Image (cartoon, grey):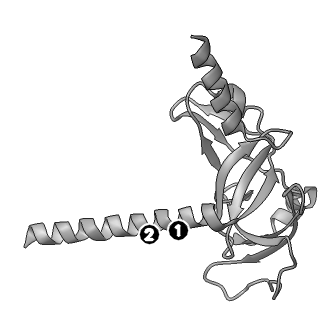
Amino acid sequence: MRRVIILLLLVITLGIVNVMVWNKEKVIKNGDRIILPLGPRDPQSIMQGDYMRLSYQFPQWLNQKEHLNRIPHFGQLLVERNAKTYIAKIVQVYGYNRGKKQRDKQPQKLKPNQYLIRYKRDRWKRVVLAAQSFFFQQGQARYYSEAKFADIRVDSNGEVILVDMLDAKLQSIRAIAKQGSNLKLNQE
């Protein structure tokens, strides 16, 4: 009986993980592309290997202390995407506090190239998005230090998935790093 329970719990756990992975893959495949500018960021961690802690470039009005104190801990950012470059800018904050009935009114219908993306505030009261770190292959920090933009997919629920980093010319850094690695292998 004990083995059956353990096996059942294992199957349920693996089922939940697979559904979560499937949902993320669906966002990557079917989500709309938006590109967000990056601010200063940390390119490495001694404990975790090569990764980049991301800092998005938010508008000045969002970073002002008096405005940050009024922003609820959870909510959605209304972003408008440029139809040609896909670069998005934040135009409005819609927040809510968990456990309270207080909720900002959200637009009933979004205009073309407008998206709502989820945010939360961290313990330092900064506005953060779900994608805060980007891990990359060891030895490729020199490529990723050139990142100026985050390539993100967003679904209709505001779920965001970070898929790549882009340089100032909006070129995929993953592709540039792969090309650089292939050149290095060919030279050896």
The residue that mark 2 highlights is: 19
Which quadrant of the rendered structure holds the N terminus?
A: bottom left
Which quadrant of the rendered structure holds the C terminus?
A: top right
| Amino acid type, mark 1 | Asn
Name above or below for residue 132 compared with residue 125. above
Between residues 170 and 49, which one lies in front from this camera angle?
170
Between residues 117 and 60, which one lies in front from this camera angle?
117
Q: Residue furthest right?
A: 61
- Across and down, in percent, residue 150 comes to 74, 49
Label 1: element kind: helix
* Residues marked 1 and 2 touching at CB (< 8 Å): yes
Left or right position of 49 against 12: right
| Residue 30 visible, this orientation | yes
- Across and down, in percent, residue 143 comes to 71, 29
Between residues 84 and 131, which one lies in front from this camera angle?
84
Q: Residues within 10 Å of mark 1 (few under 14, many from 20)?
A: few
Name above or below for residue 97 compared with residue 25. below
- Across and down, in percent, residue 28 comes to 62, 60
Q: Residue furthest front?
A: 186
Q: What is the distance, in whole Å, between disc 1 and disc 2 at their CAs?
A: 6 Å
| Residue 131 visible, this orientation | no
Left or right position of 63 against 158: right
Give the quadrant of residue 25: bottom right
- Across and down, in percent, residue 142 comes to 70, 25
Please give the name of the residue rendered at 65% of the width and 39% of the height, measured from the top-left corner: 52
Q: Residue furthest top?
A: 188
| Amino acid type, mark 2 | Val
The residue that mark 1 highlights is: 23
